[in-house]
């Protein structure tokens, strides 16, 4: 999974799961009878009670994993529910159990108190993550075009020195122009020297300009492929119109737009899959 596809809400979910796992090793009861040295009492932790362990601590960790996997692979379902929805429901169940458990124990320990706080964060981030704009923002800011091409790396599908719309690429010569017509090529006039006019070439160029574009030439209004990046993670749907996404475009990664259909783009991923990007607002062109 691309780490740049994680949102701030996903970061809170992961952090809460880590805290919850650590809290499972702490004492969830701090009972100490009077007249007894409390340092010699071995209070139980969550691993000594299978019910609390599975319903609160490991249940919360599993819920966080389902939420993250559901965001990374949209469309996967469990008993008719999306993985993210199932994980959010499980996180609410863990919070519910932790709340009533801490009320039932008169001397709650650090493990149970920390577990309750972690389940509150976990359930809140799992539910509000897709809804609150602050939590929907990327966890890591998208890399700039120059930063994404350091070290001589070329974008996917582009050859060195070829201009295919990628950032910093060379522009293709206009249709009908020959390499020998520009400066810097063998036989081209140097700067400061007048160009030698060839009557035969001038007549040929004039005849080509007067002729209409043939079938092999691309009309000026045709779509030109270009590289682009998305500001936030966005689903890529199949070209057959299926409602289930086939992939997810992650921020900080360059993708190739090969065709335009209305307001949507036909995009190609790094592994060669093609699909429809329906939401093109805010994309960054290379």
Image (spheres, rainbow, N blue to C red):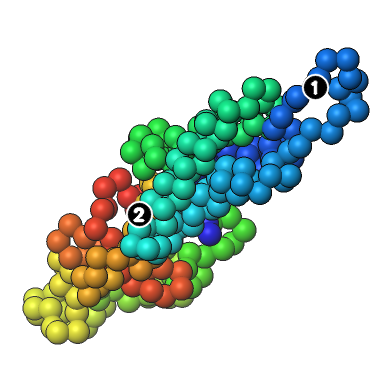
Question: Do tag 2 and tag 1 residues touch (Cβ < 8 Å)?
Answer: no
- Depth check, mark 2 against mark 1: the one in front is 1
- Who's the residue at 17% across and 57% down the image? 263
Q: Is residue 144 above or below residue 133?
A: below
Camera-side residue: 49 or 274? 49
Q: Position of residue 146 (x, y in %)?
A: 51, 50
- Secondary element at image label 1: loop
Location of mark 2 (residue): 234
Q: Mark 1 — residue? A: 32
- Residue 104 in the image, given as x and y percentages of width and height: 58, 28
In the displayed structure, would residue 253 be above or below residue 27?
below
Horizontally, is 157 left or right of 115 in the view? left
Q: Is residue 48 left or right of residue 14?
A: right
Callout 2 secondary element: strand
Instruction: Tell me if mark 2 has few (under 14), some (14-19) or many (20+) residues whose alpha carbon lies within 10 angstroms of its own.
Output: some
Q: Residue at x 52, y 30 (%)?
A: 99
Quadrant of res 235:
bottom left
Residue 195 visible within the image: no
Q: Quadrant of the C terminus?
A: bottom left
Residue drawn at point x = 52 percent, y = 57 percent: 2
Residue at the (72%, 46%) spot, across then down: 47
Residue 1 — which label?
Answer: none
């Amino acid at each position: 999974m691309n780490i740049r596809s994680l949102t701030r809400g996903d970061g809170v979910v992961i952090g809460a799961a880590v805290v919850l796992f650590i809290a499972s090793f702490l004492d969830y009861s701090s009972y100490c009878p009077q007249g007894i040295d409390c340092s010699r009492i071995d209070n139980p932790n969550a691993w000594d009670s299978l019910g609390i362990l599975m319903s609160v601590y490991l249940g919360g960790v599993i819920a966080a994993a389902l939420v993250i996997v559901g965001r990374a692979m949209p469309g996967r379902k469990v008993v008719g529910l999306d993985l993210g929805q199932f994980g959010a429901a499980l996180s609410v169940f863990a919070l519910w159990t932790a709340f009533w458990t801490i009320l039932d124990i008169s001397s709650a320990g650090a493990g149970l108190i920390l577990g309750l706080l972690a389940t509150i964060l976990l359930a809140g981030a799992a539910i509000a993550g897709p809804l609150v704009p602050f939590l929907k923002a990327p966890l890591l800011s998208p890399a700039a075009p120059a930063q994404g091409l350091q070290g001589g790396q070329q974008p996917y599908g582009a050859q060195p020195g070829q201009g295919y719309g990628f950032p910093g690429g060379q522009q293709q010569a206009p249709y009908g122009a020959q390499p020998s017509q520009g400066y810097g090529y063998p036989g081209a006039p140097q700067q400061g020297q007048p160009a030698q006019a060839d009557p035969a070439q001038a007549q040929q160029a004039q005849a080509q300009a007067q002729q209409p574009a043939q079938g092999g030439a691309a009309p000026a209004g045709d779509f030109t492929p270009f590289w682009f990046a998305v500001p936030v993670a966005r689903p890529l749907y199949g070209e057959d119109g299926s409602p289930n996404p086939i992939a997810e475009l992650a921020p900080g990664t360059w993708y190739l737009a090969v065709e335009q259909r209305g307001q949507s783009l036909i995009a190609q991923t790094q592994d060669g899959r093609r699909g429809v990007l329906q939401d093109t607002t805010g994309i960054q062109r290379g």
